Image (cartoon, rainbow, N blue to C red):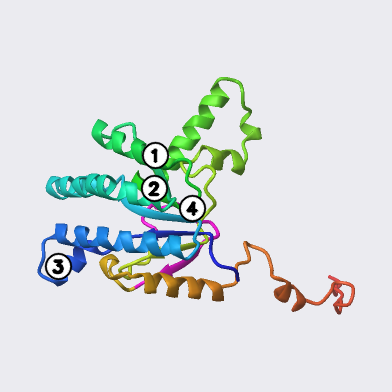
Amino acid sequence: MSDPRHIAIIMDGNGRWAKARGLPRVAGHKAGVDALREIVRAAGDNGLEFLTLFAFSSENWSRPNSEVTELMGLLKLFIRRDLNKLHNRNVRVRIIGARDDLASDICVLLNEAENLTAANTGLTLVIAFNYGARDELTRAVQKLAQDVAAGILSPNAITAEMIGAKLDTDNIPDPDLIIRTSGEMRLSNFLLWQAAYSEFLFAPEYWPDFKPANLLAAIDEYRKRVRRFGGLTAEDAQSFPDSSEADVVPLRHTAG
C-alpha cells in the first residue's frame, strides 16, 4: 500500500499523563502542545499532505471553567508563537468546527491563521476546534434544507457528494488513517462522515508521549493494511471461481 495522504489524530490522554506524574491537568495540556509541535514538523518532513488534529471538541465546553480558560490560553499562545513558524515552513492552516458562538478574539486568531497561510502549498494542517461531527452534519443538512425550501434543489437530487461539499472538510480528502492515543478505542464524535473507509490505529501512549517515531511506526503499520473500500482487491477476486467455470448445483424440487 502507498503512504497515506491524510492522517487524522485524536490527541487523547493529556489529563491522565499529568495525573500519573502528580501534576495538574494544565501541565498535561502544555506537554500536549509540545507534542503537537513535534508531530506537525514530522508530518511535514515526511511528505504528508494533510494532518488533522482534534484540538477541542464542541463537548469540551462542559469541562470546568478553569480548564477551558487554560485551554483557550494555550490555543492563543500556540497561534501567536507558532503561526509564523508554520507559515515559514509553507504549512497551510485550515480550521474546522462551528464559529458562530465563539468569542471574537478567538475568531480573529483563527481567521488570521487561515488567511496568513492560505497560499501555502506544503502540509495542510487542519485544526478541529469547537468541532463535533454530529453538529457538522447537522449544519450541512440545514444548508441543503435551505436550498430545498428555496426551491433551487429537489430532495431527490441530493447526493453524497453534495453533503460532503457542505461539510467543514470540503476540498479536504477523507483521512486514510485515524490515530487515537491513550488506548481508548472510539471516535468520540470525530469525522463520522469522513471516516467511512479510514484505517484505524489505537496507540497506547498518552498524547504527550506520542513522538515522531510513533507517527512513523503508524505509517509503517498503515502500509501493511489492505484497503478495499467495500469491494475486492485483485488478489481477493482471483480466489473466486469465474461464474462460467464454476460447478452449478441444480435445485432439486420435491413433489408435494
Location of mark 3 (residue): 19
CB of mark 2 within 8 Å of CB of mark 3? no
Location of mark 2 (residue): 87
Q: Kindly identify the amino acid type of the residue bearing the numbered disc 4.
A: Gly
| Quarter where residue 139 is shown | top left
Which of disc 2 and disc 4 is earlier in sequence? 2
CB of mark 1 within 8 Å of CB of mark 3? no
Q: Kindly identify the amino acid type of the residue bearing the numbered disc 1.
A: Leu
Give x and y (percent) for residue 94. Answer: 42, 44
Q: Residue at x 48, y 53 (%)?
A: 122
Q: Nearer the viewer, residue 243 or 112?
A: 112
Location of mark 4 (residue): 122
CB of mark 4 within 8 Å of CB of mark 2? no
Location of mark 1 (residue): 116
Which of disc 1 and disc 2 is earlier in sequence? 2
CB of mark 2 within 8 Å of CB of mark 1? yes
Give x and y (percent) for residue 164. Answer: 55, 43
Q: Kindly identify the amino acid type of the residue bearing the numbered disc 2.
A: His
Q: CA distance from mark 2 to mark 1?
A: 7 Å
251 displayed left or right of 41:
right
Which secondary structure is most common in the magenta stretch?
Answer: loop
